[in-house]
Amino acid sequence: MRSSSGRNSGNNGGSRGGNSGGRGNYRGAGNSRDDRQGGGSGSGGGRPRNPRPEERKYDVGGSGAPSDGPKRGRGAAARGGAKGGPKQSPQRGGGRTAPARSREYDARTEERNRERYANKPEVKTPKTFPGAEQEGERLQKVLARAGMGSRRACEELIEQARVEVNGEIVLEQGMRVDPEKDEIKVDGLTVATQSHIFFALNKPAGVVSTMEDPDGRQCLGDYVTNRETRLFHVGRLDTETEGIILLTNHGELAHRLTHPKYGVKKTYLAAITGPLPREVGKRLKDGIQLEDGYARADHFRVVEQIGKNYLVEVTLHEGRKHIVRRMLAEAGFPVEKLVRTAFGPIGLGDQKSGWLRRLTNTEVGMLMKEVGM
């Protein structure tokens, strides 16, 4: 039985190996696939044999010559090609690299260079471009930085003869000015060219008119805590009085706005209870005797009346403490609510309570004109 089975297996193997159309026996001796590939490559007959993965050779040197050393990558990829890999720069001198210098050596070299040029005089290069010997900045650049528009728009202002420098109208481009010294006006209004800022705050009721409060109450400084420059308020408002109050870092302007000499007018809206006689307005304009002297209103009018409730507008240029409340109380009409709606030419408008806004250049110019600056 054993011999017959062996013969059968041998016959079957032989028939598969000898069959030119079959796959051949790949599990032992007599593998016709290896024989055909080996014979075909050696004798030149048939198609060439593809090398197996373990037999393949990869060119990493770029010269095409086979290398006996260990293979580090696949062609261009190992040299930093499109498929990645570190980029290797060509080495000169047969692959030799220059020795790295120590940090101590670089430090000594830098110290020697500093000692070498320490006592040499500084060489100033000549100013060869036209206008370099002139000092100051170009007028259109100063105007653009002050917010009057782009440089081209500022050049058009100069062409239209709307710009004055120190009282003289500028008629040509390229004039240089000193923003710290020269007085610049556009349409008769002074331009704030220096690093001065101006804000208008609609102060709510209950806020103290100070930049800091030792008792921890809410004050004006709480609205400008994120400003880098120090600001201070122009005048004061009572704690219970609402309305516009100015904040700036321009000391001279703030001083003039509050000085009685310049008489900057302030406008208030007061809620009172009537009946209100007609002669009350004349009495306020003629002057009311207070404990610290006479106080006069520049303007008085009734804005609104609902039954016995009146909303009146009072304008005056004085800035004494509680001046409006004391005047109306002396006339027999205590104030229930008071709001300042205008400070000089700057009106409150529709600005919401507690909101802070930056004044425009036109508004700043109007303020300066109001006090002769």
Image (tube, rainbow, N blue to C red):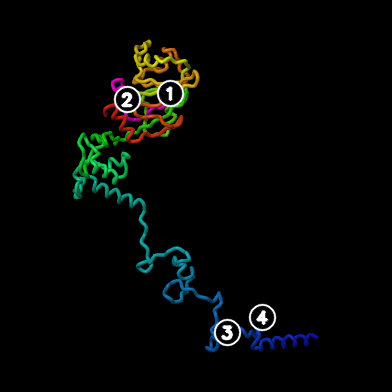
Q: Which residue is mark 4?
A: 27
Alpha carbon separation for disc pair 3 and 2: 107 Å
Q: Which residue is mark 3?
A: 37
User: Looking at the picture, how far across and down is residue 45, in whole percent?
Assistant: 54, 89
Sequence-wise, the earlier of marks 1 and 2 is 2
Alpha carbon separation for disc pair 1 and 3: 113 Å
- Looking at the rendering, the stretch of residues picked out in magenta corresponds to 239-263
Is label 1 in a helix, a strand or a loop? Answer: strand
- Mark 2 and mark 4 residues within 8 Å of each other at the beta carbon: no
Mark 1 nearby-residue class (10 Å; few <14, some 14–19, many ≥20): few
Residue 371 lies, with reference to residue 92, above or below; the image says: above
In-front residue for pair 59/221? 221
Disc 1 residue type? Answer: Val
Disc 2 residue type? Answer: Leu
Sequence-wise, the earlier of marks 1 and 3 is 3
Sequence-wise, the earlier of marks 2 and 4 is 4
Identify the image quadrant of the C terminus.
top left
Is label 2 in a helix, a strand or a loop? Answer: helix
Identify the image quadrant of the N terminus.
bottom right
Residue 99 lies, with reference to residue 121, above or below; the image says: below
Sequence-wise, the earlier of marks 3 and 2 is 3
Residue 120 visible from this viewpoint: no
Q: Which residue is mark 2?
A: 257
Residue 276 lies, with reference to residue 85, above or below; the image says: above
In-front residue for pair 62/321? 321
Disc 3 residue type? Answer: Gln
Disc 4 residue type? Answer: Arg
- Mark 1 and mark 4 residues within 8 Å of each other at the beta carbon: no
Q: Which residue is mark 1?
A: 303
Alpha carbon separation for disc pair 4 and 3: 16 Å
